[in-house]
Image (cartoon, rainbow, N blue to C red):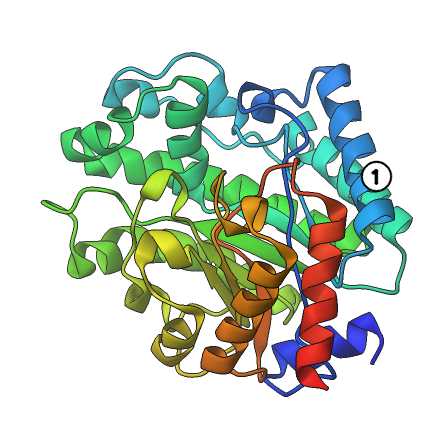
Amino acid sequence: MDKKQLMDAFFANEKPDRVPVGFWHHFVSFHDHYGYEDPAVYNAVVTGQKKFIDEVDPDFLKIMSDGFFGHPSVCRKTVRTAEDLAEIKAVGPDHPWITRQVEYVRDICDYAGDGLYKLYNVFSPLQYIRLRFEEFDEDFKKFTALFRQNTDIMVHAAREIAKDVNCLVDRLFEETNVDGIYYSVQSVQDKFTFNRDRHDKVVRPLDLAVLDNIDAHAKKNMIHICGYFGYTNDLSWYVDYPVQAFNWAVYSENISLAEGKRIFDGKPVLGGFDNRPNTLLYTGSDEDIRREVCRILDEAGTTGVGLGADCTIGDDVPVARLELIRKIAEDYRR
């Protein structure tokens, strides 16, 4: 199978010649994740993404959205109160935050060519708010505090952002050769006041406002249920989201790829490796890696299964290590 056939089998929940392998890393620092207007940041991301394509030769490409993590309305000033969130408004399809992303994705898609599927990273509307608070402001309590303070205003802000995310999605599929979306979500990390019922009433409609639009454009989409910083989510909340494949933090959630595949009703899943520094992916011997690949595939099988990580890996993981995982997966299928 060529790479598109490999991924066709994966998305169709079939058994390919070998399981596909997908890893990715950032190209700029956390604070620069919001710096698309800085030519140095933008150029570093473009150059880094093209270098990654050349060196890794991936089975499919997750195009990183470094530089575009912050919605302009959230980034205009430091949000301190719920009333500040009331000022958040959609910026429209012609704002540079959207036009530059379209330009960037078009460039990367053209560079990658037609030989592999290309998925662009898009965050849920609420994630654009949370990430700005936690990554840039380095305030890890603000997001949940403001949710408690005034849920209605938080939902208003997310709805405004969703308008722009949908504008972005529309333009990506109309003006670039992108094949799908890698949609990143996270449940509100407030176990005391945020349960399944509240998620379904508050968060789910915001997600579906974007995901239904994505699904109308393409059927090669993957959801990432983010467990970065050790955050946890109830995977069952996302089972019937309209996506074709699922990726989550196996080690943060303590839910294996095999168990997750059962939770998601047998749908395609990707992951298996811990992305955190000083774990097996970084420090294990070649034989350690071989045993781990075989263990994962012994448990999860090879039908609708892909190998990857809980989240973004460090850029210090050697390309040879990623190629080794792909080679072991090929040997395993044989």
> Which image quarter holds the N terminus?
bottom right
Looking at this view, name the residue that lies furthest to the left: 192
Q: Secondary structure at mark 1?
A: helix
Q: What count of labels does the image hold? A: 1
Residue 328 seen from this side: yes
- Vertical placement of 263 versus 109: above or below? below
Amino acid on which disc 1 is placed: Lys
Location of residue 267 in the rendering, given as x and y in whole percent from the top left corner = 48, 79
Please give the name of the residue rendered at 23% of the width and 38% of the height, measured from the top-left corner: 152
Location of residue 252 in the rendering, given as x and y in whole percent from the top left corner = 34, 51
Location of residue 290 in the rendering, given as x and y in whole percent from the top left corner = 61, 66
The residue tagged 1 is 51
Please give the name of the residue rendered at 32% of the width and 20% of the height, measured from the top-left corner: 139
Dividing the picture into quadrants, the one containing residue 133 is: top left
Could you classify mark 1 by the number of other residues whose Cα lies within 10 Å: few (under 14), some (14-19), or many (20 or more)? Answer: few
- Vertical placement of 49 versus 18: above or below? above
Location of residue 200 in the rendering, given as x and y in whole percent from the top left corner = 25, 60
79 displayed left or right of 28: left
Please give the name of the residue rendered at 66% of the width and 50% of the height, measured from the top-left corner: 120
> Which image quarter holds the C terminus?
bottom right
105 displayed left or right of 155: right
Please name whichever residue, 164 or 144, is drawn nearer the observer in this view of the structure.
Answer: 144
- Vertical placement of 203 versus 300: above or below? above
- Vertical placement of 48 versus 295: above or below? above
279 displayed left or right of 308: left
